[in-house]
Image (spheres, rainbow, N blue to C red):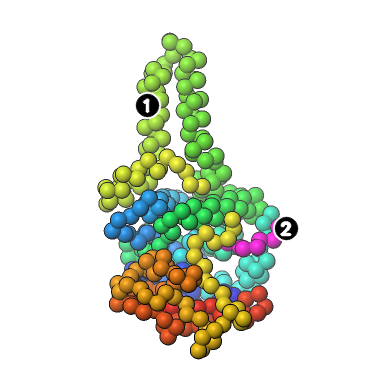
Amino acid sequence: MIKGLRAVRTSTTFFADDDVFWAPTLLSHFLAPFEDPKVGAVGGLQTLERKQHPNCWDFLGTIYLERRKFELAATNSVDGGVGCLSGRTLAIRTGIIQNEQFISQLLEEKWLGFLPLVAADDDNFVTRYLVNHGWKIAIQFTKEAELTTTLEDNPKFLAQCIRWRRTTWRSNFTSLFIDRVIWRDQPWSTYALHLSSFNPPALIMDPLLGYSLFRAIEASGPDSCFPSISASLVLFLLWVAFTKTVKSVGHFRQYPADLKFLPLFFFTLQKTGWGGGRSEVVSDDEKHGEDGLRPSAPEDIEAGSTYAELKRARCSGIDIHLLGEKVKGLTNLSRAASPVFDLELGGKNRLVRDPDML
């Protein structure tokens, strides 16, 4: 990544994951905030690619992104705070990321100042770096700046959640107690985002709150100003339900059929390795075939397949990386459609296979 950053010649650099689809107007809307010289980076809204028949994992992924949109809109509007500037798509001033201080800190990032990180979380690092150096982070809350993405639609989604949760705890701890800039510059986000990430899981905390309410009313006696125990607990449950669903009201209005998944709201899904996809690294001794490389994808893929469907069909065990629109008319993804990128990994030249943009 650093080699690529140093080669950039434009004033603005875009980072994008291989499973995002941009709105046609996204580019211009991401560039607009840079008219303010104090804006260092720009992010946008994210929506999960909608399937015709979503399952419970699709629903949890959708709600995760919906809640994140709600929180971003609130904190960024109040004091400019952002929990994490997502690397799925972000735009940043090239001068920031080509600064040798940025590069050295990214490569040598340590937790608590002395514990080396085996797999640094670049999204959180970039966010903290911008805040610590006085740059504004702009979020474009418009449909024109929206991107569509994919998440795991199976139990692997839990692995993604675990990774997100761990990196959030680690990064927020660093922001709160090592960097400490957010206490002064983003007081509301400090309370609403960073401190709240250390709250106990709702699956534990909510029953304890209900039990505490029950014991308090029971001990207050018949002359207390509280309503009856049963009425109080009903009100408590309604309040809990409201706080868990208010961020997703817009989604349920658009897709009322998803109300059948509502009980999943009451279970909090809280490895620093990537929980999702990976590129397969082909070492020198693994090469074979006429061109010295093995095929990088299944032989038969249905025409009209989406990125998510291609990813699930990885018979060879590697990801199928595509940028742009849904694939149309694809019937045979072979070596001919798979350019090779030569990377230096671990001091040894190896080959990473990625299908061509279609």
Question: Residue under circle 2?
Answer: 114
Q: Which mark is residue 45?
A: none
Task: Please state the extent of the stretch shown in magenta in the rendering.
Answer: 115-121
**Residue 349 is inside the magenta segment:** no
Most distant residue in the bottom direction: 290
Instruction: State which quarter of the image contains the N terminus.
Output: bottom right
Q: How far apart in space, not on screen, are marks 2 and 1 (Cα)?
A: 49 Å
Tell me the SS state at disc 1.
helix
Q: Residues within 10 Å of mark 1 (few under 14, many from 20)?
A: few
Tell me the SS state at disc 2.
loop
- Residue 115: x, y in percent? 71, 57
Front residue of 313 and 185: 313
**Residue 116 is inside the magenta segment:** yes
Q: Which mark is residue 234?
A: 1
- Residue 195: x, y in percent? 56, 45
Tell me which residue sits at (34%, 45%) in the image: 261
Q: Against 285, is 159 above or below?
A: above
